[in-house]
Amino acid sequence: METRCLREWISEDLHLTQEDVVKMATELLNQMEKRGEDNSSFLVFTLSNIFMKQTEGIRSFWYEDVSDTQLFMKEKHMYMPCLEDDKMEISVTLYSLGMIMYQLLNENRFPFVEDGMSYHQIQKMTERRFSECLPPISDIDEKFYNVLSKLCDYREDMRYQDVRKLQEDLYALSLVDEEPEAFFEDLADGSDVKEQEVIRSTNGKTSLVVNHLLHRRYRIVRVIGAGGFGITYEAWDEKMAMKVAIKEYFPKNLVARNAGDHHVTVMTQADALEYKKGLKRFINEAKSLAKMSNYDVIVNVFDYFEENHTAYIIMEYLEGKSLKTHLDECGQLPLDRVVHLMKILANALQEVHDRGLVHRDINPDNIFLCENDRVHIIDFGAAKNIDTHDKKTQTVILTPQYAPLEQFQKQSRNDATLDVYALGATMYKTLTGQTPPSAIDRIGTDRLVAPRKIRTEVPVELEQIVLKCMALYPKDRYQTMQELLEDLMESDKRSSSKWNAASEVVKKHFWKITGICVCLILLMSVGIVRRNSIELYGYPCEIVLRMPTNWFDTGIDKQVDKVNIYAQTYQNELKEKQRIEEEKAQKAEQETVSSEKTTESDTSAASSNEEKIDEKLMIPDSDIIDVN
């Protein structure tokens, strides 16, 4: 995550698209309105007081008061028209915003400005706008150019004079097909949302109260969970006499509840259109789920409706826990369980795709494990219709570690490969217990660690399936869930056939193998046979005897991997023993040579001493007396 002013970003060749610039302007105007500065006379936008934060490819903008800095004082006149009698109005603020927008889209150049000009020359040059139109910019549409021209018009009476009008035009550029006023009437029964006083409860709770009767039918029991965009309740359906789950649309950064009221209130007019777009997505989620309700793996939707100025989805109440919670508790899943789970999910997602939808947010949090080995896919809030031909501009909603690279872009195609990547990342998590890195972090140097390096017993075939699913480029992935499902089934079939073959061998030669093992143990116990001198089915008996007692309780892929591990361990131990024996032999030899040298030296010294003693004891012949 990086946070800097635009001047610092531009020094690193920041490139902003038309959508980025519209988003920047919208967020700055919303911030002005929330601060009560929509009629301010002092605010001038420059590259020094607009800040941008970039997190996981998503950019957000805001402004700060830096009016006391020398840099701001020096450059602010570049973004202001010549004023008569220092007349400052909101149109001056909007003019400065237009100049920033134009500069960002025009390779950091002002209109009518040439390289090498001083600040004074730039100011004089901009006066040509009295008679000349704003120079066009490539790659922007005509509507956006008209907004820029009106923002940057040097004539005061031709510029925008009102923040609200500019917001409406910018929202139109964001492909919002409804006028803001129309939604305000629907939302607040004709009253102006801005004039409503938003009162938050003293305990900070924003959920519906327990025992509240919703839609004259569903009685709230408790809050199950809450996120950034909604609240989920457990409720009792008084008509059908059963438990249900209710999901309420409640984007907490946009709305609040009046104390003692159940209605949702949008905080400001500027937030209302964003809230409306989110509400449409929420209703679309209900419709998407309703299409799948007759499929076992998709959570059932019984009803959806609008009430309390928001919307609700009535769903099947699931007993269990999410895959994420399960993985947090156990770390990894057994290999056979992973394959079984992924086959269920791949089959379910193929059904979703066949019905023209892409989920776009498959991750362990959206996979729910129930009793009796039932699995459910939940949360279709990001689902879109499949469109493999054209790229469409759309809101970026994703879980970073489980989203493919193209999903971080505002313009992307909605096809099956999005869900293929997400399911592959989920498979990676279930196999290794580790969350995969974000696709953005894999650009350049791929930081994705192969599953077998984390968990050695993962079969090669299963690892290859995971890595193919998580390929950075869509063309390198499985193109359909059916292709992925076929490889999963083939991998499972190969594992099963290996296990069956091994089982048949064991059954056929059970008593022979048992007898051999017993004999070997007896022989080795009395030292007649060395433990590493006999092989059994290609492996030294040392390895066989090391195999755990529950070895035959696991799949053949796990058995083969364990044998390989034990074989490698055995070879390493042999090498280590051989090295130690060689070192001992070498050391013994050195000690023997040293001992021989010492003995020889001692012998030589002793001989010398004996000669000296003999010389002293030698008696001349003349001195010998013959006693006879």
Image: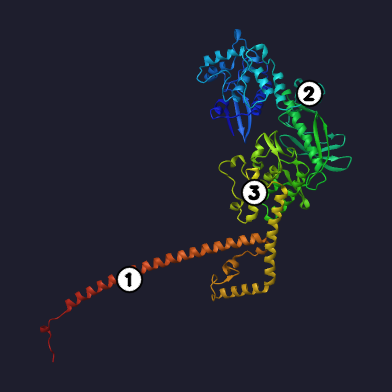
Inter-mark Cα distance, 3 to 2: 48 Å
Q: Nearer the viewer, residue 358 or 586?
A: 358
SS under mark 1:
helix
The residue that mark 2 highlights is 184
Q: Position of residue 359 (x, y in %)?
A: 73, 41
- Residue at horizontal 45 percent and vertical 66 percent from the top: 581
Q: Nearer the viewer, residue 197 or 266?
A: 266
Instruction: Determine the residue located farthest toward the top in the rendered image.
Output: 85
Asked whether residue 473 is in view, the answer is yes
SS under mark 2:
helix
- First in residue order: circle 1 vs circle 3: 3
Disc marking residue 596:
1
SS under mark 3:
helix
Q: Position of residue 66 (x, y in %)?
A: 57, 21
Amino acid found under the numbered disc labelled 2: Phe
The residue that mark 3 highlights is 468
Q: Nearer the viewer, residue 235 or 103?
A: 103
Asked whether residue 201 is in view, the answer is no
